[in-house]
Amino acid sequence: MEDEQNLQPGGEAVAPARRASPGSECGDEAQRPNPEKKQRCRLDGQETKASKLITSSASDFSDPVYKEIAITNGCINRMSKEELRAKLSEFKLETRGVKDVLKKRLKNYYKKQKLMLKESNCADSYYDYICIIDFEATCEEGNPPEFIHEIIEFPVVLLNTHTLEIEDTFQQYVRPEINTQLSDFCINLTGITQEQVDRADTFPQVLKKVIDWMKLKELGTKYKYSILTDGSWDMSKFLNLQCQLSRLKYPPFAKKWINIRKSYGNFYKVPRSQTKLTIMLEKLGMDYDGRPHSGLDDSKNIARIAVRMLQDGCELRVNEKMHAGQLMSVSSSLPIEGTPAPQMPHSRK
């Protein structure tokens, strides 16, 4: 589901590489100024075309591994796009994407190799699964402020973080109860027909089916998981409003989530304007697969971005939450906690 950048409902494998060092979202690079000592730039003992004298501090972090990482990062910064692709290909890593993405990918590959032993003790603390959710809702052309959006498609894509593959999907259409007739604009945008929503269950019925499906997957009991969305609005606006309309309390399992736009912007160091679904795909060298503004297809494409980010070394973490009915940010320095097991929320009085 698009957020305030668009104001319209509906959004926008290679051997898996594990995540970057813990403690900061999406693995900040280890680089330090204050040059004191010159060293020859080499990667795996081989000088690249971009190999030049670079400097690094002899007093970087107490562990020498961080000094090695800083030296390697300097080498990578001087590589051409062709050299980056050649090196990535050598390690059987993805070679698509703009130059900044390729640099980030290669830096995190080397960083993970050097820190692998250090991170082995905390590898099991990450999520086993990520549930990607991208609602579609009723809408009208021009998005009038007084219009009440109701969820009409509830998709979930289950991403296994160990295999980096989509393990299963869930999709149900939802029958709106206020604006029961879909506008022509909504039908053309989402591809959802009046007949599909007329035959569908109401939101409380669909939510129960979602929760039952998640329970069958043992999410929150046997497996640690998190929810991931494309922006803030799926949870903070559309689910929040729908629960009020359906006289349900906001479900606890949906109170925290990963906003992939924030994660993408922080990891690849790009402005917010560059975090639209289609732009993220383009910058990563991928095309949209499916029908835009289909909730399920949007969710699958968001999952593809999440996979690429995990391969590139990004530790996707919860970064937003609902608290007392308000949207709030979550610090990336907090320990990783799994989402509670899904339970059907109580009715509002």
Image (cartoon, rainbow, N blue to C red):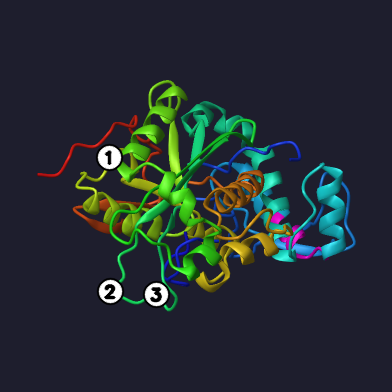
Q: Label 3 near label 1: C-beta < 8 Å?
A: no
Q: Which span of residues is magenta-colored?
A: 73-80
Residue located beneath label 1 in the image: 252
Please determine whether, in this image, residue 207 is positioned above or below residue 82: above
Please determine whether, in this image, residue 153 is positioned above or below residue 269: above
As shown in the figure, which amino acid type bears the numbered disc 1?
A: Pro
Residue located beneath label 2 in the image: 146
Q: Nearer the viewer, residue 6 or 48?
A: 6
Residue located beneath label 3 in the image: 143
Judge the density around disc 1: few (<14), some (14-19), many (≥20) Cα neighbours within 10 Å.
some
As shown in the figure, which amino acid type bears the numbered disc 2?
A: Glu
Q: With 243 as the anchor, is 5 left or right in this view?
A: right
For numbered disc 3, what is the local secondary structure? loop
Please report whichever mark, 1 or 2, sits nearer to the chain's N-terminal start.
2
Real-space Cα separation, disc 1 to disc 2, in angstroms: 28 Å
Q: Residue furthest top?
A: 222
